[in-house]
Image (spheres, rainbow, N blue to C red):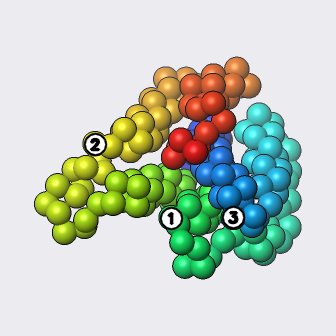
Amino acid sequence: MTEIDYKKNLLIGYLTSLRLYPNYVFFEKKYKFGKAEILRKYLSTIREQIINVKSEIKFDNYESIIEKITPVPHEYDSVLASSALDACASVVELISYIEDRDYSHIQSILTLATDSVDMYIQENENLDMNNEDFEMRIATHPLMVKEHNIQKGIIGYLNKIQKIDEKDLLTLEILQENNGLGNLNL
């Protein structure tokens, strides 16, 4: 893997985690559990890593720190707990990618984003898994279409550029910005 590939993958994971972050904030406000500022601090540090890959960053004890602020979904009456868990897991996966550069972490982050949307749609639309159009209703729901389009758009943009600079990062942050709302429009 080249340094450019590493940086592009890091940016994909960062932007996806950034879309999941507001879901965590929404959950924290509603259920009075969590510490969004911890995730925000990790994301800010990772953003700096994208701009300045040469900087050496140590994420000591990040897994245990994030675990303490991660909700256990079955303890809550809403899929929002799963979405908050996905936001936490995405940051853990992103830091793991920085440490070992294994692309499977980026794939996991992308899956977490679509899984959050999938579960949210199922709960809010009260979908029956036994219904023959179950998968189609999820796949064509505006939130899922938007998430897939954002993922494709980011990858398409990154495939067209050779080097990532702060202008590219700002452009992509703005393109996916949703008035401070996450990928669930919360």
Callout 1: SS: loop
Tell me: residue 31, above or below residue 135.
Answer: below
Callout 2: SS: loop
Label 1 to label 3: alpha-carbon separation: 12 Å
Tell me: residue 180, above or below residue 25.
Answer: above
- Mark 3 residue crowding within 10 angstroms, few (<14) / some (14–19) / many (20+): few
Q: Give the labeled residue for mark 1.
A: 79
Foreground residue among 54 and 22: 22
Of labels 2 and 1, earlier in sequence is 1
Q: Give the labeled residue for mark 3.
A: 31
In this picture, residue 62 sits left or right of residue 167 = right
- Mark 2 residue crowding within 10 angstroms, few (<14) / some (14–19) / many (20+): few
Q: Name the residue: 41% across, 42% down.
A: 143
| Image quadrant in which you'd find residue 134 | bottom left
Instruction: Please indicate, yes or no, whether residue 96 appears anywhere in the rendered image.
Output: no
Q: Mark 1 touching mark 3, by CB under 8 A? A: no
Residue 70 circle label? none
Q: Name the residue: 77% across, 74% down.
A: 68
Label 3 to label 2: alpha-carbon separation: 30 Å
Q: Mark 2 touching mark 1, by CB under 8 A? A: no
